[in-house]
Image (spheres, rainbow, N blue to C red):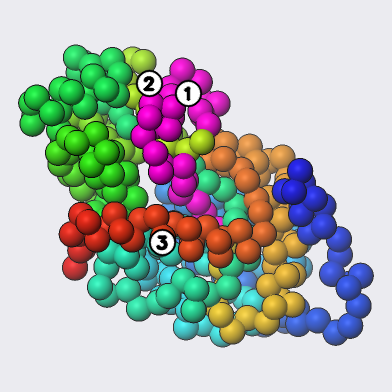
Amino acid sequence: MKRRLWLSAALIPLSLAGGALAQVPTDRGPLRLVVGFPAGGSADVLARTIADKLKHELGVPVVVDNRAGAGGTIAADYVKSQPGDGLTLLLGTTHMMVMAPLTMKTVRYDAARDFKPVIRLSSFQETLTIPAATPAKTLKAWLDLAHANPQYASYGVPAPGSLPQFIGYRLGEQAKVKLLPVPYKGTAPLTQDLLGGQIAAGVLPVADMAQYHGERVRILAINGTRRSPRLPDVPTLKELGFGEFDHLEWTGLFVPRSTPDDTVRQLEAAAARVAAMPEVQEALQKLGSIADPSPGSTLTQAIANDIALWAPVVKSAGFSAD
């Protein structure tokens, strides 16, 4: 209900607020939507879907600027240094704003100090997946197998220092089973190794695994507070007795800290209208995301909550990507 009320409020034209507001300029070239990942990936597809709609809402051309590398931190560092004129937006993720600063010594930005959140667009769930040939039908059975035989204790993650790595670490800690993370360079090679049985398990987004569930892989559990509509037979970790796996990874829009609040509100209202469009919601679902647009303040709290949850886990794991 609160989200519906916020979306309704965001649709009210800013002109009704009265007074001279700082607006996104329409005579100084295109707005750049900066993405920290390569063209063709899910983040890029989402960005291009949004960009196509935002240009009509704001009355300015919107171009997607891919600045891939270092888990998105190159893009975030770039946006931090840009003028706060409303013409530079960052498609930010949990990894960029929470996990990278916790795990990498070379990150030169602070999510709270250097950016203003505009809107949360979506979130997504992770799976704990094993090859279908593995002699385990449940999470408990796999954990017992991993405890008895180290060959079953390795789990792949899409990148070193990514949230899936610490989901696996925390699961092992709670189950008192030593699980070994195996970082990959992206979800694609990890998916192939899972399908081929070359890795004992993997922690991957629902979007990457749902289509193979029950045939080539077995999804044992997902994170979050509720089951995925795409995997109604798969329990949550919470259902299985494992706590503190409620937080989901999210995607949102950010601007440099110097951006005027009036401009941020204009961008938020425009992005809220875009996020409410059925075609955008459908695109998010196809990407395996949960469409849950909410105000920028939601991201402020999410970042604080995620850091409070995962900082002790990262420290306990003794991890550093540098």
Q: Residue 64, image x and y in percent?
A: 53, 63
- 191 or 17: which is nearer to us? 17
Q: Residue 174, image x and y in percent?
A: 27, 38
Q: Write down the quadrant of residue 59 in the picture.
A: bottom right
Q: CA distance from mark 1 to mark 2?
A: 8 Å
Where's the N terminus, which quadrant? Answer: top right
Which residue position is annotated with label 1? 231
Q: Which residues are magenta?
A: 226-252
Residue at (39% x, 39% y) in the render: 243
**Magenta-drawn stretch contains 232:** yes
Task: For mark 2, give the secondary structure.
Answer: loop
Q: Which three-letter amino acid code belongs to the residue tagged 3?
A: Ile
Of tags 2 and 3, the one toward the viewer is: 3
**Magenta-drawn stretch contains 7:** no
Q: Which three-letter amino acid code belongs to the residue tagged 2?
A: His
Q: Write down the quadrant of residue 73 in the picture.
A: bottom left
Which residue position is annotated with label 3? 307
- Closer to the chain start, of discs 1 and 2, is 2
Q: In this picture, is 126 found above or below 120? A: above
Which residue position is annotated with label 2? 213
